[in-house]
Amino acid sequence: MSWIWDSLPVVLNRANSTNPQLTFFKFIEMKNISVIGSGTMGNGIAHLFAQQGFEVALVDLSPDQLQKGMATIAKNMDRQISKGTLTETDKAASLHRITSYTSLADGVKEADLVVEAATEKIEIKLDLFRQLDLLTPAKAVLASNTSSISITQIAAVTQRPSQVIGMHFMNPVPVMKLVEVIRGYTTSEETTRQIMSLSSQLEKVPVEVKDYPGFVANRILMPMINEAMYTLYEGVTGVSEIDTVMKLGMAHPMGPLQLADFIGLDVCLSILNVLHEGFGNPKYAPCPLLINMVAAGFKGVKSGEGFYCYPAGTKDYPVSTRFSK
């Protein structure tokens, strides 16, 4: 459960205080979390909240996707058990806290917080938030896991813009410590404080950022990935060479081209388009190679091939023959 601060001024009489007027915050309970979307990010977010003791409703229109998402959660928990960071009892209790729904109305009707983790397309997100505004309790906070889309624009389609915020988790969610907390133009101080506190309770490190294209993480990361693609596109060197330079020379745990594959090349393209359109600066224009790869269906890990190939049942990822010398 999450206990969230709510403003309440109070005067404390302290003998040694020169300024007894302090601000006190009372706790408000938050326990029911609805996660929209059971894909990579959605099932990771559901996993995280359930493991931390929250009641989780995992919502997806596709029963097959829900089944796949729940199987992924169980598999990832087994991995934690093998590493000694989770017990079988903890796993059983965590899975018991997750209930799956194919009905959006049923899945969010008791939500204290909704975390939307649907496809990174503005039309889909705006439609979802219009529905969430009508279907959730008036007190509920509506959060988006968007990696680049404007929180202010999303909030504007609701009747509760002060309660709309960004919670940008990193992949894999149960492992990565960062949560970008994006405060839209109309997001209230109370909502921001609430989500910052909640993120800390999840044992994450929240960083508050303002609502500008790409926020912080992707405003910095995506131009680097895009430049790596241009370096390949212009024939400066090969895929593994680019990634090796960044891993060994810059201490990155993963090279930018392989990282792009793991993020999803379609997602990278979407974010770069948001940056390009949002700032109107040609430096954010997506590399033609990226555009062609996405159009041809080579999206990275999710499609089985991007800059590398991802054969099932192995972690040996060879460079795609399309880029072999």
Image (tube, helix red, strand yellow):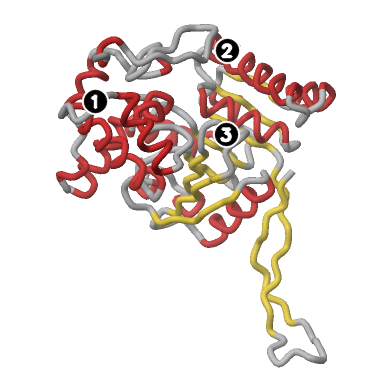
In the structure shown, which secondary structural element does the residue marked by tag 2 occupy?
helix
Q: Tell me if mark 2 has few (under 14), some (14-19) or many (20+) residues whose alpha carbon lies within 10 angstroms of its own.
A: some
Decide which of tag 1 and tag 3 comes sooner along the chain: 3
Q: Is residue 314 above or below residue 4?
A: above
**Labelled disc at residue 68:** 2
Residue at 67% from the left image edge and 45% from the top image edge: 203
Q: Quadrant of the C terminus?
A: top left
Q: Nearer the viewer, residue 255 or 281?
A: 255
Q: What's the CA distance linking mark 1 and mark 3?
A: 26 Å
In the structure shown, which secondary structural element does the residue marked by tag 1 occupy?
helix
Q: Position of residue 62 (x, y in %)?
A: 51, 13
Side of 5 where 81 appears, left or right:
right
Residue at 27% from the left image edge and 40% from the top image edge: 274
Q: Quadrant of the N terminus?
A: top right
**In the rendered structure, which amino acid carries the disc numbered 1?**
Leu
Q: Tell me if mark 1 has few (under 14), some (14-19) or many (20+) residues whose alpha carbon lies within 10 angstroms of its own.
A: many
Residue at 41% from the left image edge and 30% from the top image edge: 259
* Residue 134 in view in this figure: no
Q: Are marks 2 and 1 in contact (CB under 8 Å)?
A: no
Q: What's the CA distance linking mark 3 and mark 2?
A: 17 Å
Residue 297: image quadrant is top left
Side of 63 where 97 appears, left or right:
right
The residue labelled by disc 1 is 290
Q: Nearer the viewer, mark 2 or mark 1?
A: 1
Decide which of tag 3 and tag 2 comes sooner along the chain: 2
**In the rendered structure, which amino acid carries the disc numbered 3?**
Val
Decide which of tag 2 and tag 1 comes sooner along the chain: 2
**Labelled disc at residue 173:** 3
Q: Position of residue 5 (x, y in %)?
A: 67, 59
Q: Tell me if mark 3 has few (under 14), some (14-19) or many (20+) residues whose alpha carbon lies within 10 angstroms of its own.
A: many
In the structure shown, which secondary structural element does the residue marked by tag 3 occupy?
loop
Q: Nearer the viewer, mark 3 or mark 2?
A: 3
